Structures are given as structure tokens and as C-alpha cells.
Image (cartoon, rainbow, N blue to C red):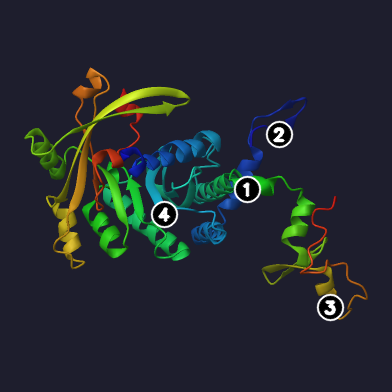
Amino acid sequence: MDGIGIQRGDKKSRCRVIPIRCAMRLSCVEESAWVRAQAAGVQSLSQRQVVRGKVYAVDGSGLGDDFRVVALVCVSAIRPIIVAWRLLRGPSSEKGKEAAVTRSLIEQVLQVAGPKAINLLLADALYADGPLLAWLKYGQGIDALVSLPEDRLLYQDLKGLADGRLLDWTHHRYVRTIQGHKQVREVEVTAAGALTSWEGFTEAAARYGRADASLWACLIHDVTTPDLAAEPPRALVSTRSFADGFAARPRLSSTLAH
Amino acid sequence: MALRRGLAFRPRWHIEDDTYRELKEGWGLEQQRWGRDVAAALGRTTLTCLAFNTAQVYRLQAGERLAGMAIRRLRRQRQRELGSAPAVLYVAGGSGVFSLEEVLNVLGAAPRESLLPALGKPSSSDAPT
């Protein structure tokens, strides 16, 4: 929309005329119509088998102080495709609300793409919600792999097991490439399964008739430099068991790396 | 072996780096708001996400092949049954795309000759337009 404006003499005003007119007309369209447009657009992609793979990620992002977008994205292929989204009012959303939105996004995609369209959902710590994980696993047959905040009992349990040398750490060295630059990274990882110290999850799972529900979790400690090694390890939790923590490890973000 | 086995959490990065960053910095979703009205923001978000997906699809291998076609050739290939000059009819809030022959038939003036390509015999889709 750059360069659109009112002609005043020889100069072109930077006033964005067309976007304002568009906005006035957009205001006349009902919210339900936009939801239908969203579903129709994604269904078209799904029917043409453009949305490939069964690994999805959910996350939210603020749009200024007024709105927040929460999107479910198919991240299996090189090119991510946004398969469902919601616009929430307000600068940030509380955890419970975002979990409710996540459910509606998942249901929307399963309705369009079939009940087995998703087999793994990736999410950050905001989505570390026990009832949500239980609903995904036992209600929809979808595994989740989620960042686990340090303040959770499960994190403390896992850290305690590792600190008490009841779990073995393994050392891994690998090369990552960021914008063409190769970096050697070193991480130590440890993992444990059959964890039951997350009541929110186990109680919700019990409501699905799964009294034996448990979780898998791992700690990932970046030891590339002494500074990084001094930081607490990052944790992931999943309803699926992975071979080891290294197999589940995230791309270490800049916040973790610096 | 461990590298090949999983790296399960790594694709999550796509949603931050290749999706939200692209939507905000590339498509201007945050900066160019089209107003503070909720309905306008909803429309802007929906249109942008759909456009983002369309661009993503065109960046796929199949999409690149499609993008390489001229529009008339594309129309001939994709909508052979409509002919080269289809008619769009709007009635009672609905719309449809029809071949001119079909419209004439419905109006009771059947065409003596049809310019529609012989369906089922693809032959000239690669001819210059």
C-alpha cells in the first residue's frame, strides 16, 4: 500500500486513502464471514494437498497494544502454512484463554483436514497447560511437545533427579547454521519418562479414563560457553516419549544463546 | 543418529521466524493497521493470512510451475470447459461463471457453432497465446 495517496499539486501526500476506505468497508463485514473465509481458504489448500505433514505449532503474537493473533501453523514442510487463526482483543491474553483458543483452532483444522491431520503439536511455555495436554492426547489423539517453565513442580522434580545423579546426562556437540554462519554448539541433555507430578494433567487425563497417564520430559543445558553453562537448563515436556532429550531439543534461540 | 531421529521441537521456530516475523515485517500486519476498529483489524488479519498462504504456496515447487504460466494459458488449462471468454452472472446475491455457449443455451438461443475446446482431448494447451 506504500505510495498510495492524494495528489496535491506536484506532490503526493503520504495519506493512506485507500487503506482507510478499505477499513471503512471492512468494518461492514461481519466477524462470522471472516471466519468462513478463513475456513474456505484453508480448506482449498487442504483439498489440493498443499498442507503437508502432521507437525503443527501454535503461538500468539501481539499486534501493538490492541490486538493479539494466535495462529496454528503447519510447520512440517520448509514453507509454513497458517491453517487457523484468531484475533484476540487486548495486548496479551491469559494462559487459560489462549488454551481455549488453541482448542478451537485445533477443532477447526480437524474438521477441515480430517481427524488424523495432526499428530504432534509444538508450543512454548504459555501453552504448558495440563488440561490442554490431556485433551490433545486423550481427546484428540494428538501428542504435544511443550516448553516447561522453571516454576513448575515437574521441572523441579526433573531437576532434582538430575542434580541427585539419578539421571544420566549425555553430552552432544553439533554444528548449527544461522544466516550462513556455522557455529559449534555443545549441549548436555537428560530425560525421564513416566512422570506424574503434574496434577493438572493427570487429573484431566483421569477424566478421559486414563488413570495411568504420565509425561516425558527432558532438560537441555547449553554448555557452549561458561556464561551459557551458568544459566539453568531449559525443559521440554511431552505426552510422547522421545528416544532422548537431544532428539527433542529445540533450536536454541537467541535469548538462550546470549 | 540422534540428529536424524528427532529434532522434534526445532520446527516450532518456523512460527516465530518464518510466520510472525514475515507477517509483521514483510506484510506490515502490525504497522499498517487499517484503523483501530476490531472489524477492520479482523479483515486485515484474515486477508493478510490468506495472502501469506497464497505466497507460500507459490514458493513451493508446484507453485513455481503455476506462476510460470501466462494467465490465458493458465485459464485454458484449468478451466477448459469455460472457453476463452466465460461470463460471470450475478443473481440474487449469488454468482457463477459460465461458458457463453451455456448462457446462450439457457436463454433459448443455442449457438450454431461452439468455440469450446473438445474436452477430453487436450491438445493445444501449450500453443502460444
Of circles 3 and 4, the one toward us is 4
Disc 3, SS: helix
Q: Which of the marked residues, 1 or 3, is nearer the chain's N terminus?
A: 1
Three-letter amino acid code at disc 4? Lys
Please report the residue visible at 49 percent of the width from the left and 53 percent of the height from the top.
A52
The residue under label 3 is which amino acid type? Asn
The label shown at residue A33 is none
Which amino acid type is shown beneath numbered disc 2?
Answer: Ile
Mark 4 is surrounded, within 10 Å at the Cα level, by few (under 14), some (14 to 19) or many (20 or more) other residues, namely some
Say which residue appears at 65% left-offset and 30% top-offset.
Answer: A14
Q: Which mark is residue B63?
A: 1
| Residue where numbered disc 4 is placed | A54
Mark 1 vs 3: CB contact within 8 A? no
Looking at marks 2 and 4 on the same chain, the residue that comes earlier in the sequence is marked by 2
Q: For residue A26, say whether it is visible.
A: yes
Q: Which residue is mark 3?
A: B105
Q: Nearer the viewer, residue A9 or A79?
A: A79
Label 1, residues with CA under 10 Å away: few <14, some 14-19, many ≥20: some
